[in-house]
Amino acid sequence: MEEVKPQLVKITFDGIEVEVEPGTTIMQAARKIAEADPSQSGLVPPAMCYYKPLPTSGGKCRACLVKVAQGSAKDPRPMPKLVPSCITQVQEGMVVENTTNQGVLDTRKSIVEFLLINHPLDCPICDQAGECHLQDFAFEHGSVKTRYEEDRRTFDKIDIGPFIQLHMTRCILCYRCVYTADQITNKRVHGVMNRGDASEISTYIEKAIDNDFSGNVIDVCPVGALTDKTFRFKNRVWFTKPEDAHRDCDKCSGKVTLWYRGEEVIRVTARKNTWGEVNDFICNTCRFDKKKTTDWVLEGPTKVKRSSVISANKYRADLVKKPDFSLKLAASQFKPIDDRREYVTDEETIRHQSIENNDKANHRSLLAKNN
């Protein structure tokens, strides 16, 4: 029998129409628009807890709230409150406002402020700096001031396994690490303990997280709460060079990103997609034990987004296209340099030219003052 394809649902997101399959969330619909047209990536709501590879994730951080101005074609009434786009499914004729709604942007700024109430501003010493989703979220939607005067909650750093250190002070309780352990291990030994402002990620009676895939909680953590003990304080991410590589592994896919400092592999991580989500979880053997180039088959440089801080170090400048607006700005506001001028190296000539230029500058200042 011929397979019957489901009828697509048409919605309007920030004035852009898109057709998606029934059951698709608003977040996934927005991502579909951005994947079809990368210039629209700024329309996609931020996600601090939603992680597509992890079932049931989302709905915790409220960073992706959007306004549904029209519920559906059958019921055009707007939804009375902002809804989380990561868990709200689309309906035929739905109209969604994200960046075009000032109320959404104001709420998002409040969410940033809420997440930073207890999160320490220790980016200069945090290993997650440069890859931190909270950094990006705060930069795009945050405020330069804080109204919070009370003491932040603090925790001691603890080791929750041979390779992982937990800095609970930085945790935003997104639950990603809990969902990861639920998905790839048979016996999860950590979770969220206590309630309210006493909630924390912890292990049961300090039981260590020790399984073949425990290192994946490091990759899914959006902040610097779970860090790689073998990489801590070794280097800044923008001084390293990532390369895609693979190996034959009997436990996982063996597809990784190698992070180089010179000729040395200083860490190994799972590969991530455009949205910073892991494509295939990797085992601890690949992550912690195989740190020699000879252990891997190199595929080539990892594709780095222009917005990534990694590209700020002129990493693969031949592959990273400069944005048009910067070239237009330079052409309109900066004078062209005449490189045909003679290059003067004689010190006496330079001294006389300097005196002459100073006299001209003083003369222009006097004329401006008298006028």
Image (spheres, grey):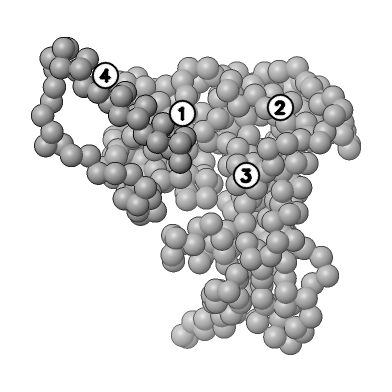
Q: Nearer the viewer, mark 4 or mark 1?
A: 4
Q: Depth check: 163 or 336 in front?
A: 336
The amino acid beneath tag 4 is Ile
In the displayed structure image, the side of residue 334 where residue 103 appears, left or right: right
Residue in the picture at 54% in, 19% down:
232
- The residue at the point 39 percent across, 53 percent down is 325
Camera-side mark, 3 or 4:
4
Using the numbered discs, state the Cα–Cα distance from disc 2 to disc 4 in whole angstroms.
Answer: 52 Å
Which quadrant of the figure contains the C terminus? top left
Q: Which mark is residue 120?
A: 2
In-front residue for pair 215/123:
123
Residue on which disc 3 sits = 137
Which callout, 2 or 4, points at the residue further toward the start of the chain? Answer: 2
Q: Amino acid at mark 2?
A: Pro
Contact, mark 2 vs mark 4 (Cβ under 8 Å): no
Label 4 belongs to which residue?
355
Q: Secondary structure at mark 3?
A: helix
Residue 128: quadrant of the picture: top right
What residue sits 50% from the left and 58% below the top?
41
Q: Which mark is residue 237?
A: 1
Tag in front: 2 or 4: 4
Q: Residue 321: percent from the left, percent from the top?
A: 32, 49
Point out which mark residue 98 bears: none
3D distance between C-alphas at marks 4 and 1: 46 Å
Task: Residue 8: give x, y in percent of width and height.
Answer: 56, 80
- In 3D space, how far apart are the residues under numbered discs 1 and 3 (Cα atoms)? 18 Å
Looking at the image, residue 316 lies above or below residue 4: above
Q: Count residues near mark 2 (Cα–Cα under 10 Å), then give few for <14, some for 14-19, many for 20+.
A: some
* Gap in angstroms between the C-alphas marked 1 and 2: 20 Å
